[in-house]
Amino acid sequence: MSKRPLILITNDDSIYAKGIKSLVDVVKELGDVLVVSPQDPQSGMGHAITIHEPLRLKPSNQFKDIEAYTCSGTPVDCVKLAIYEVLKTRPTLLVSGINHGSNAATNILYSGTMSAAVEGAIENIPSIGFSLLDFDTDADFDAAKHYAKIICQNVLKHGLPKGTCLNVNIPKGKLDTLKGIKICRQGKAFWEDAFEKRTDPFGGDYYWLTGDFAVTDRGEDTDMFALENKYVSVVPTQFDMTAHHLISTLNEWDI
């Protein structure tokens, strides 16, 4: 009898989010599951780690027969603790999500969901971050679950090159409204930041970040185009941020 794969699940919306429950429902059919998830929402934390206060890890019965823990830290903290303290080994697969909201284009830089997947890639674990383009806490995850299962099965079968992970975004909508999967590149789209200045009851000023997400790349091979046209986008992602094309130019500088 073949040994079942060991699958680590985390997210950034906390262990109580509907998205992570949906992901547990999908992957528990594919292997043995461990969940280590933030006890509180950690959206927008990026690749932050906790270094100025202790980390706390507590058992959770959130998923009944699935071994699970809450972590007081960030999604990346969750991955590190899972590998080095709970499992004391590397899992076969790491999956993060399913996030409530998009992590397409440059959103990946801010995303706790995708930073957990990138941390998995750093540890040479095949890793996937899943996001659904719906911020509703009670969003319909049926289509996301359908495609998450397909993609997880393929990664378990084929693996991923070391140092890479997948950024998967699923459009909002019923399964029969989606057109399938497109392998894409990361589109160029950026937050045009704005700050709303407010005053608290004590007369002190504070600021609330707002802004619009501006798409500057209309290429038909991007994740933004795929999502706008009701396709699931899959972007192969790596943590090497070197601008390789600039090395030869810098070598010509008088430095």
Image: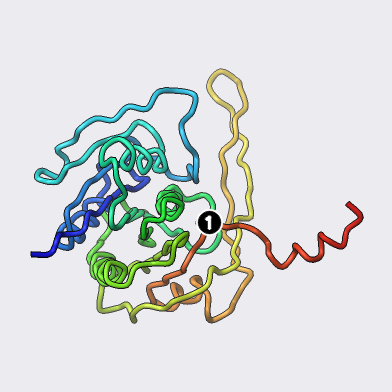
Q: What amino acid is labelled 1 in the image?
A: Phe
Residue that sits furthest to the top in the current view: 202
Residue 11 lies, with reference to residue 103, above or below; the image says above
**Pointer 1 residue:** 239
Q: Position of residue 149 (x, y in %)?
A: 24, 67
Q: Position of residue 148 (x, y in %)?
A: 28, 66
Q: Is residue 7 left or right of residue 42?
A: left
| Coloration mode | rainbow
In front of the other: 201 or 111: 111
Quarter assignment of residue 213? bottom right
Residue that sits furthest to the right in the current view: 254
Q: Is residue 39 left or right of residue 200?
A: left
Q: Position of residue 114 (x, y in %)?
A: 43, 54
Q: Is residue 10 left or right of residue 239?
A: left
Q: Secondary structure at mark 1?
A: loop
On-image quarter of the N terminus: bottom left
Counting labels gives: 1
Quarter assignment of residue 128? bottom left
Task: Classify 10 Å Cα crowding around label 1: few (below 14), some (14-19), many (20 and above).
Answer: few
Say which residue appears at 20% left-offset and 41% top-offset. Answer: 68
Say which residue appears at 17% left-offset and 41% top-offset. Answer: 62
Say which residue appears at 33% left-offset and 80% top-offset. Answer: 180
In front of the other: 15 or 88: 88
Q: Position of residue 102 (x, y in %)?
A: 43, 59
In front of the other: 182 or 6: 6
Residue 46 lies, with reference to residue 92, above or below; the image says above
In front of the other: 15 or 82: 82
Q: Is residue 186 left or right of residue 173?
A: right
Say which residue appears at 62% left-offset and 27% top-offset. Answer: 205
